[in-house]
Image: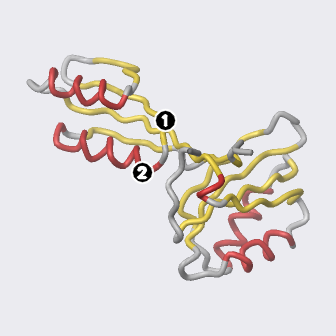
């Protein structure tokens, strides 16, 4: 099993781009000008400092995927483009979340243990957690924590690689 949940509406596209100022603005501007919706966006340098990797999830329900790829290919700083099929890739996202503890500390710790989340910081009445998983699993944890009172929440956006299944 590759660790991702297939979802036909969202497709993950990974682009390798030259690591130069303005490249991200050009890529995101392409989507904006053409009315494409980016659901998730993550950018980071690669192991080669000349390049960065942009991983984005697009809503292909309203826009054919081939149009997105054709438009990306026209951008001069784009070196490579891959569409990662959800069935053949591994996707992960990181969530940082601060939750009220109140008088339900034991119950909250059971949820934290169920998901093997990491405690990053604790205060008298709040706890900050970190967890990395498939986006759908993060959604599940978020829903389990909602009754405690979510103070702050930040998610990174998806990152993905092709699965290693041979």
Determine the image quadrant of residue 103: top left
Lateral position of residue 116 relative to residue 75, left or right: left
Residues at badges 2 and 1 in contact (C-beta under 8 Å)?
no
Location of residue 86 in the rendering, given as x and y in whole percent from the top left corner: 59, 58
* Kind of element beneath mark 1: strand
Location of residue 152 in the rendering, given as x and y in whole percent from the top left corner: 33, 39
Q: Name the image quarter holding the C terminus.
A: top right
Query: Which numbered disc covers residue 132?
Result: 1
Rate crowding at label 2 as few (under 14), some (14 to 19) or many (20 or more) other CA atoms within 10 Å: few
* Kind of element beneath mark 2: helix
At horizontal 32% and vertical 41% (from top left) the residue drawn is 141
Q: Is residue 116 above or below residue 64?
A: above
Q: Is residue 24 above or below residue 91?
A: below
Lateral position of residue 162 relative to residue 139, left or right: right
Q: Name the image quarter holding the N terminus.
A: top right
Location of residue 78 in the rendering, given as x and y in whole percent from the top left corner: 86, 60
Number of marks in the rendered image: 2
At horizontal 44% and vertical 32% (from top left) the residue drawn is 131
At horizontal 30% and vertical 29% (from top left) the residue drawn is 114
What residue is disc 2 on? 136
Query: Which numbered disc covers residue 115?
Result: none
- Label 2 – label 1 distance at C-alpha: 11 Å
Q: Of all residues shown, which one is farthest toward the left?
A: 103
Q: Is residue 133 above or below residue 124?
A: below
Location of residue 129 in the rendering, given as x and y in whole percent from the top left corner: 37, 28
Lateral position of residue 109 relative to residue 87, left or right: left
Rate crowding at label 1 as few (under 14), some (14 to 19) or many (20 or more) other CA atoms within 10 Å: some
- Camera-nearest residue between 90 and 77: 90
């Amino acid at each position: 099993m590759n660790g991702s949940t297939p979802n036909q509406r969202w497709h993950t596209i990974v682009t390798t781009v030259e690591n130069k100022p303005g490249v991200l603005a050009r890529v995101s501007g392409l989507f904006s000008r053409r009315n494409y919706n980016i659901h998730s966006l993550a950018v980071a340098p690669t192991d080669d400092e000349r390049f960065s990797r942009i991983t984005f999830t697009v809503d292909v329900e309203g826009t054919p995927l081939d149009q997105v790829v054709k438009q990306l290919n026209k951008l001069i700083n784009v070196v490579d483009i891959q569409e990662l099929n959800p069935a053949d890739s591994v996707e992960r996202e990181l969530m940082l979340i601060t939750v009220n503890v109140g008088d339900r500390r034991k119950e909250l710790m059971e949820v934290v243990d169920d998901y093997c989340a990491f405690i990053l910081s604790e205060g008298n009445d709040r706890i900050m957690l970190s967890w990395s998983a498939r986006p759908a699993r993060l959604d599940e944890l978020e829903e389990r924590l909602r009754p405690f009172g979510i103070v702050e929440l930040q998610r990174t956006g998806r990152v993905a690689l092709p699965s290693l299944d041979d």
